[in-house]
C-alpha cells in the first residue's frame, strides 16, 4: 500500500556549517525522492488538504503528476492557483494547513506537500534556465498559463488600468490575475526592490533572493505587469491623484503591516536597540551580510532577540550568522511559541539559546549610550487570557541581567497609517487595519485591499488568497462601470 512508505526525509545543510553562512538550509527533493514521496498520496476523493489550503491548490492533481514523473504537468496544475510556488513551498505553514489536514497524518506522517510544491517549482525553473532562455517572454514561463485572457478594454479600445500598491504576495497575486484577464496593471512599490517581506524580511537562508524570488517576480512581470519601485503612495503621489489624474480606474492596496511595535520600557532608545524589521531589512535588502556591500551591521558578540514568532527566529538566526551568541527572550514557554515548529527546531539545532518565561523590563546602557545588558524578570504561567493561552505573570523579586550588545525587538507589527491618512473615504479599525468587505472592497468605491494591511501580520498564503479575491472583485467592479 502506498501509505506504508515512510515520509521521504529532505536533505539539509549541516547545522554547524550553516550557522556560519547564508546559504539555504534545506536542499529540497531530487526527482526520484519527489516521485517516491508523491506515491504516498492516496488521491482522496474529498481531499481535506485542498479545503485547508487558503488558495485551494489542487494538491492531489499536482501530486499525481509528480508521481507519474510529469513535472511540467504538475507545474501547470499549481499555476492555476498560485503565482509563487517556490516561495510558498518554502515558507507556508503547511503543518497547520494542507499537511495539518492530510488524512495520512491521522495515524502517521502527512504527505510532504510543501516540499513537493517546492520541488516542482525549482525543477521547472532549473529546466528553463538550462534551456538558456531568460524570463523575457510569457512563453518562457510554462508555469503561468494565459488561458482566461478576456482582453478587458475601455470605451476607447485601450486596456483598463489598475494600480496595485505594494509588491508583496498580496499585490503580486492580485496583479497576476488581473494581467492574465487582460488588464493594464502597474504595481507601485516604496522600496527599491519588489517582493515585500519576501525580499526585505525573510532571510536568504530560508528564501534565496536571486535564485528563487527574483524568478517568481520576473514571471509576474512577464505577464505584462509593470513594477515601479521607489514610489511611496501617499508621499510621491496619492491614491486620489492616481484615480483622478493618472487614469487608474481601480486600486488594490497591499501595503502590508510594516510598522514595528516596541515594549515601551526604559532604555529602548539606546544605540544597539533595533526593531526586527530594521535589522532584517538592513541584512536582506541592504545586504549587510555580504562583504561586497558597504552597508554592514555590527551586532557584536552577544545579541538578545525579544519575541517568539517567525520574525524572532529569523532575526536570531541572522544575528548568529553575523557571528553573535544569540538568546531568544520569550515570556511564555516553548509550547506557546508562535513560530513554525520547523523554524524553532532549526534555531535550536544551530545553537540559539532560548530563555523562556523571561520578560525584559529595561535595556541598560553604558556611559556612551550603547546597550550593555537586558534587565529581565522571570515569569510563571497564570490563568488563560482572551487568546486561550495561559497568561504570563511576573515573579516578584526575580529580576536579573543578561549582558548583551544588541537587543532586537520582534514583538509584532501593524499597518503603516500613511495611505489611510492621505486617502479620502478609507476607514480603518482600531488596530489601523483597512476595513474591507468579504470581497476585499474598502469603504472607498473602486479601492480594494488585502493581505497584512487588512488582517495585520499574517501569512504569505493568506495574503496571496486575499489578493486573488480582490482581483475577482476588481474585475466585477470594472465590468459594471
Ligand atoms: P508585504 O509582504 O508586507 O508587502 C507590502 C509591500 O508594500 C512592501 O514591499 C512595502 O514596501 C510596500 N508598501 C508599503 N507601503 C507602501 C506605500 N505607501 N507605497 C508603496 N508601497 C508600499 N509568512 C509565512 O507564511 N511564512 C513565513 O515563514 C513567514 N515568515 C516571516 C518572516 C518575517 C521576518 C516577516 C516580517 C514576516 C513573515 N511572514 C511569514 C509573514 C508574511 O511575510 C506576510 O504575512 C506577507 O508578506 C504579507 O504580504 P502582503 O503582500 O500583505 O505585505
Ligand atoms: Fe493526498 Fe493527503 Fe491530500 Fe489525501 S489529504 S489527497 S493523501 S495529500
Image: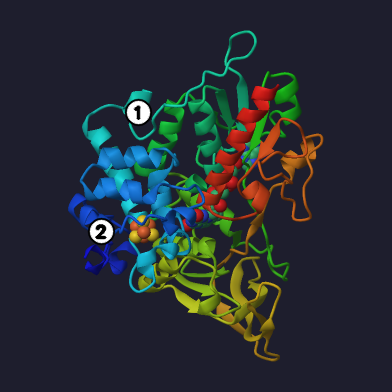
Image region (quadrant) for ligand 2: bottom left
Q: Is residue 21 left or right of residue 463?
A: left
Q: CA distance from mark 1 to mark 2?
A: 30 Å
- Outermost residue on the bottom side: it is 397
* Image quadrant in which the N terminus is located: bottom left
Q: Is residue 429 left or right of residue 227?
A: right
Q: Residues within 10 Å of mark 1 (few under 14, many from 20)?
A: some
Secondary structure of the residue carrying tag 2 is helix
- Residue 295 visible (yes or no): no
Residue 238 x %, y %: 73, 30
Q: Residues within 10 Å of mark 2 (few under 14, many from 20)?
A: many
Residue 166 x %, y %: 59, 38
Return the mark for residue 273: none
Q: Of 296 and 195, which appears nearest the observer?
A: 195
Say if 52 sits above or below 248 in the image.
below
- To which residue does mark 1 refer? 135
Secondary structure of the residue carrying tag 1 is loop
- Outermost residue on the right side: it is 425
Label 1 beta carbon less than 8 Å to ligand 1: no
- To which residue does mark 2 refer? 37
Q: Earlier in the sequence, mark 1 or mark 2?
A: 2
| Residue at screen point 43% across, 42% down | 84
Q: Is residue 372 left or right of residue 44?
A: right
Q: Of 153 and 335, which appears nearest the observer?
A: 153
Residue 78 x %, y %: 38, 42
- State which quadrant residue 436 falls in: top right
Say if 155 sits above or below 453 in the image.
above
Label 2 beta carbon less than 8 Å to ligand 2: no
Q: Of 425 and 107, which appears nearest the observer?
A: 107
Residue 421 x %, y %: 79, 40
Amino acid at each position: 500500500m502506498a501509505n506504508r512508505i515512510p515520509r521521504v526525509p529532505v536533505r539539509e545543510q549541516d547545522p554547524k556549517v550553516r550557522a556560519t553562512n547564508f546559504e539555504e538550509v534545506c536542499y529540497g527533493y531530487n526527482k526520484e525522492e519527489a516521485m517516491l514521496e508523491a506515491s504516498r498520496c492516496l488521491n482522496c476523493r474529498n481531499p481535506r488538504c485542498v479545503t485547508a489550503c487558503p488558495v485551494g491548490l489542487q494538491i492531489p492533481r499536482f501530486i499525481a503528476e509528480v508521481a507519474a514523473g510529469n513535472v511540467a504537468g504538475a507545474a501547470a496544475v499549481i499555476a492555476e492557483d498560485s503565482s509563487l510556488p517556490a516561495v510558498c513551498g518554502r515558507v507556508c505553514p503547511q503543518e497547520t494547513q494542507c499537511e495539518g489536514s492530510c488524512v495520512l497524518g491521522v495515524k502517521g506522517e502527512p504527505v510532504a506537500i510543501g516540499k513537493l510544491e517546492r520541488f516542482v517549482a525549482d525543477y521547472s525553473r532549473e529546466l528553463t534556465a538550462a534551456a538558456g532562455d531568460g524570463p523575457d517572454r510569457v512563453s518562457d514561463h510554462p508555469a503561468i498559463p494565459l488561458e482566461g485572457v478576456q482582453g478587458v478594454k475601455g470605451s476607447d479600445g485601450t486596456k483598463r488600468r489598475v494600480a496595485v500598491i505594494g509588491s508583496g504576495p498580496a499585490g503580486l497575486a492580485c496583479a497576476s490575475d488581473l494581467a492574465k484577464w487582460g488588464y493594464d496593471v502597474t504595481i507601485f512599490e516604496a522600496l527599491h526592490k519588489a517582493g515585500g517581506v519576501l525580499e526585505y524580511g525573510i532571510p536568504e537562508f530560508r528564501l534565496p533572493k536571486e535564485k528563487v524570488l527574483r524568478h517568481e517576480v520576473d514571471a509576474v512581470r512577464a505577464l505584462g505587469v509593470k513594477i515601479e519601485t521607489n514610489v511611496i503612495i501617499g508621499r510621491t503621489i496619492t491614491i486620489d491623484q492616481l484615480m483622478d489624474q493618472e487614469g487608474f480606474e481601480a486600486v488594490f492596496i497591499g501595503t502590508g503591516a510594516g510598522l514595528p511595535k516596541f515594549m515601551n520600557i526604559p532604555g529602548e532608545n539606546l544605540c544597539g536597540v533595533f526593531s526586527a524589521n530594521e535589522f532584517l531589512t538592513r541584512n536582506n535588502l541592504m545586504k549587510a551580510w555580504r562583504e561586497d556591500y558597504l552597508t554592514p551591521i555590527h551586532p557584536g558578540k552577544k545579541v538578545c532577540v525579544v519575541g517568539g514568532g517567525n520574525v524572532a527566529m529569523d532575526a536570531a538566526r541572522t544575528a548568529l550568522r553575523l557571528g553573535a551568541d544569540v538568546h531568544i527572550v520569550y515570556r511564555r514557554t516553548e509550547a506557546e511559541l508562535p513560530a513554525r515548529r520547523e523554524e524553532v527546531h532549526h534555531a535550536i539545532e544551530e545553537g540559539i539559546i532560548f530563555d523562556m518565561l523571561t520578560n525584559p523590563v529595561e535595556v541598560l546602557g553604558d556611559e556612551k549610550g550603547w546597550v550593555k545588558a537586558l534587565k529581565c524578570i522571570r515569569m510563571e504561567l497564570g490563568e488563560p487570557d482572551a487568546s486561550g493561552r495561559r497568561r504570563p505573570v511576573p515573579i516578584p523579586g526575580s529580576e536579573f541581567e543578561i549582558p548583551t550588545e544588541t537587543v532586537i525587538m520582534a514583538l509584532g507589527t501593524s499597518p503603516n497609517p500613511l495611505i489611510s491618512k492621505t486617502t479620502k473615504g478609507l476607514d480603518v479599525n482600531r488596530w489601523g487595519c483597512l476595513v474591507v468587505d468579504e470581497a476585499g472592497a474598502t469603504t472607498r468605491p473602486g479601492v480594494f485591499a488585502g493581505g497584512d494591511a487588512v488582517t495585520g501580520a499574517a501569512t504569505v498564503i493568506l495574503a496571496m488568497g486575499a489578493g486573488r479575491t480582490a482581483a475577482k472583485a476588481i474585475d466585477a467592479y470594472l465590468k459594471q462601470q
